[in-house]
Image (spheres, rainbow, N blue to C red):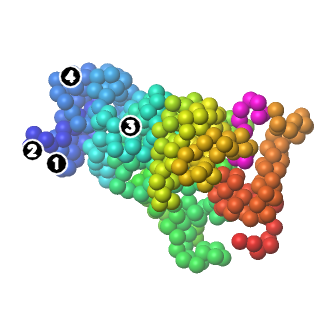
């Protein structure tokens, strides 16, 4: 073995399993050293540098969790995976919170073990910024913290729940976690759970066989299998209906899916990231989100702060967006006047970075081509048009809820009214209305159906 052969530390108090692990690692042409207890592992870590550690939970004189704590203090750059008792998700979750990049349950399946080791050794441990991060604009303290968290999360296989307001950059963060991690060469598949009609969900997620139902004219793989080996990003996960939450939980637990109309199950190996602008914990409290799925998805939370809490990033974002737009329009980027930039920095941006993008796109159309002035920004009008009104002053415009009316119904009334306003303003052009509401066409169509507003007049 050469000097750069990766060196793996195996920690287990069971001699048989220890031996099996050492043999498997040797077959993978890796150097393996075994320790039979927590104390032995600590002293080995003191005297030698390892590229990876694989530890059992029971170590005789301590636990794998204690070893993880020790590692996070003394050698945080070493990827560590844990071996857990079959079905013990609680320990696996705890271990990932303490920094384990992944877990494997007993009885140890050798294929899965090899994959786990390969994933671990493929992890880049550098704390150095990566060029992918150039895609995440902003260098203020909040963004720097987030980037450093993302670098750490990228190494782990733990499911991550990305919270943050609409348009704040949750999907961008999910893409970065994928791009910096060991699965970066494999697909990143993003799905907006709120935009899929309920009756098509199962086949969208798990696929179907040709002829499984009317309209199933050919086999379909489904999103889980499309993302196999890579990452599946479930956006607006709070919008999943309860029956689908059960199926999703099962697929995640079993790591396998069964397409509609198919007798076989297919194994899948993917990392799940999810996001929603809603408060997932309170969705769970009111019974709209399953507790077991919540704990399965929300092993670690990454929060994207709203733009108004990181105003220092606005100038860099403005330059970046203007450059991107002018490249797309094949023009040279306009300048922005001092007062206009100041107005942007003082504006609360209820629609976050997406609203900033829309504001600048409109301003570029309205300005003289050379300089964007404050009046080209239409800041107040933008805030009204997005419908995402969060500032205290604006809250007073909300209608009062009748104490007897359920919250859900009340919110639907508001949703209905906003959608109708946008449809009226666009003469029922649903593409334009969706744009005005900051949602996709599919999402609007889905909501129209839900609110029974769809006029089947054949338009579009
Ligand atoms: N830090 C950033 N640097 C550059 N562009 C950004 C950044 N954050 C967000 N954006 C851009 O802003 C827009 C909205 O971001 P994104 O779709 O990631 O938000 P989101 O929080 O997932 O939104 P939603 O809740 O509506 O799904 C995208 O066009 C994205 O490219």
**Res. 91 in view:** no
The residue shown at (66%, 42%) is 375
Among numbered discs 2 and 4, the one appearing first in the sequence: 2
The residue shown at (83%, 48%) is 413
The residue tagged 1 is: 29
| Quadrant of the image containing the C terminus | bottom right
Cα separation, mark 1 vs mark 2, equals: 8 Å
The residue tagged 2 is: 1
Marks 4/3 in contact by CB < 8 Å: the verdict is no
**Camera-side residue of 325 and 400:** 325
In the image, residue 411 lies in the stretch drawn in magenta: no
The spot of residue 222 in percent (x, y) is 52, 64
Among numbered discs 3 and 1, the one appearing first in the sequence: 1
State yes or no: Cβ of the residue under disc 4 lies below 8 Å from any atom of ligand 1.
no
Residue 378 image-quadrant placement: top right
Tell me the tag on residue 46. Answer: 4
| Quadrant of the image containing the N terminus | top left
Secondary element type, mark 1 = loop
The residue shown at (81%, 46%) is 414
**Camera-side residue of 360 and 400:** 360
């Amino acid at each position: 073995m050469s000097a750069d052969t990766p060196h793996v530390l195996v920690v287990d108090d069971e001699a048989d399993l220890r031996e099996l692990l050492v043999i498997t690692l040797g077959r993978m042409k890796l150097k393996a050293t075994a320790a039979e207890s927590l104390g032995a592992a600590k002293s080995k870590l003191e005297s030698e540098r390892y590229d990876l550690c694989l530890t059992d939970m029971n170590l005789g004189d301590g636990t794998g969790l204690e070893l993880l704590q020790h590692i996070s203090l003394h050698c945080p750059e070493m990827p560590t995976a844990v071996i857990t008792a079959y079905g013990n998700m609680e320990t696996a979750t705890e271990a990932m919170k303490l920094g384990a990049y992944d877990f494997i349950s007993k009885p140890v399946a050798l294929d899965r073990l090899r994959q786990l080791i390969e994933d671990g050794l493929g992890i880049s441990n550098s704390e150095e910024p990566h060029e992918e991060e150039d895609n995440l604009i902003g260098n203020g303290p909040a963004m720097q913290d987030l980037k450093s968290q993302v670098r750490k999360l990228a190494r782990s296989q733990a499911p991550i729940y990305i919270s943050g307001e609409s348009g704040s950059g949750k999907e961008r963060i999910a893409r970065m976690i994928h791009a910096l991690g060991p699965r970066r060469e494999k697909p990143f598949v993003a799905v907006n759970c709120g935009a899929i009609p309920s009756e098509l969900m199962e086949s969208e997620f798990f696929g179907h066989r040709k002829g499984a139902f009317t309209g199933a004219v050919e086999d379909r793989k489904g999103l889980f299998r499309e993302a196999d080996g890579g990452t599946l990003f479930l956006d607006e996960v709070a919008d999943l209906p309860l029956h689908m939450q059960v199926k999703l939980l099962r697929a995640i637990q079993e790591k396998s899916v069964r397409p509609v109309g198919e007798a076989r199950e297919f194994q899948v190996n993917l990392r799940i990231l999810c996001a929603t602008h809603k408060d997932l914990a309170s969705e769970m409290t009111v019974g709209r989100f399953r507790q077991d799925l919540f704990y399965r998805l929300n092993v670690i939370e990454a929060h994207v702060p709203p733009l108004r809490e990181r105003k220092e990033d606005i100038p860099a974002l403005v330059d970046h967006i203007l450059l991107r737009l002018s490249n797309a329009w094949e023009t040279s980027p306009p300048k922005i006047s001092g007062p206009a930039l100041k107005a942007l920095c003082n504006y609360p941006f209820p629609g976050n970075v997406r609203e900033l993008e829309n504001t600048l796109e409109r301003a570029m159309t309205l300005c003289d081509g050379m300089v964007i002035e404050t009046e080209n920004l239409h800041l107040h009008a933008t805030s009204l048009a997005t419908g995402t009104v969060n500032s205290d002053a604006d809250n007073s415009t909300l209608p009062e809820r009748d104490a007897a009316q359920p919250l859900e119904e009340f919110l639907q009334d508001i949703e209905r009214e906003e959608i109708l306003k946008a449809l009226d303003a666009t003469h029922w052009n649903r593409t334009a209305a969706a744009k005005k509401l900051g949602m996709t066409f599919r999402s609007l169509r889905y909501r129209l159906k839900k609110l029974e507003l769809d006029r089947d007049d054949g338009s579009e």
